[in-house]
Amino acid sequence: MAAAPEPDPIQESIGSLEDLILAKLDDDQAQDVVYIDLKGKSPMADGLVVASGRSQRHVGAMADHLLRALKDAGHGRCRVEGMPAADWVLIDAGDVIVHLFRPEVRSFYNIEKIWSVEPPSAALAAV
């Protein structure tokens, strides 16, 4: 009888990172949370999380809470952009990139649409 394959520790850590981020955003009442799987689509990250806050203060608080949770969980010091204004805060947690927006800014940039398009090679293969 063949033994079950060993779990991949890298994939488990990515999964736990995603779970931590999504759980923290849920705790902080983030709105319209979207997770986009980038595995095989982009070398920069394995996942992208996009969420909205109700105001600049809410976006800033969510970002601060998420950064603290990531640090406490041992994910090191994440790179952050946009904290002073808190209209759009980007948190690079390594394998997962988080975008926190005010609703107006999110609808203006509409970054979910960028990742919803099929890569050209997949579109050609379908023909």
Image (spheres, helix red, strand yellow):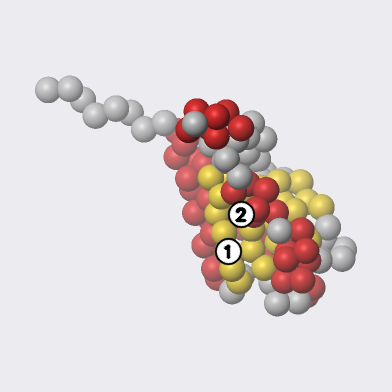
- Say what amino acid the circle numbered 1 marks: Val
Where 6 falls versus 65 (above or below)? above
Q: Earlier in the sequence, mark 1 or mark 2?
A: 1
Is residue 124 visible in the rendered structure shown here?
Answer: yes
Residue 45 position within the rendered picture, expressed as x and y whole percent measured from the top left: 63, 38
Answer whether labels 1 and 2 touch (C-beta < 8 Å). Answer: yes
Q: Residue furthest front?
A: 127
Q: Residue furthest left?
A: 1
* SS state under label 2: strand
Residue 14 position within the rendered picture, expressed as x and y whole percent measured from the top left: 52, 41
In this view, the residue in front, 105 or 89, is: 105
Q: Give the label on residue 33, or none.
A: 1
Seen at 83% across and 57% down, the residue is: 82
- Say what amino acid the circle numbered 2 marks: Val
* SS state under label 1: strand
Is residue 70 visible in the rendered structure shown here?
Answer: no
- Side of 19 relative to 83 (left or right): left
In this view, the residue in front, 94 or 42, is: 42
Cα distance in 3D space between marks 1 and 2: 7 Å
Q: Residues within 10 Å of mark 1 (few under 14, many from 20)?
A: some
Number of numbered discs: 2
In this view, the residue in front, 125 or 23, is: 125
Q: Residue furthest right?
A: 84
Seen at 67% across and 68% down, the residue is: 52
Seen at 49% across and 48% down, the residue is: 16
Residue 121 position within the rendered picture, expressed as x and y whole percent measured from the top left: 57, 28
Which part of the image, by quadrant, shows the N terminus?
A: top left
Where 95 falls versus 84 (above or below)? above
- Side of 9 relative to 110 (left or right): left
Residue 26 position within the rendered picture, expressed as x and y whole percent measured from the top left: 54, 68
Seen at 59% across and 48% down, the residue is: 116
Residue matched to label 2: 49
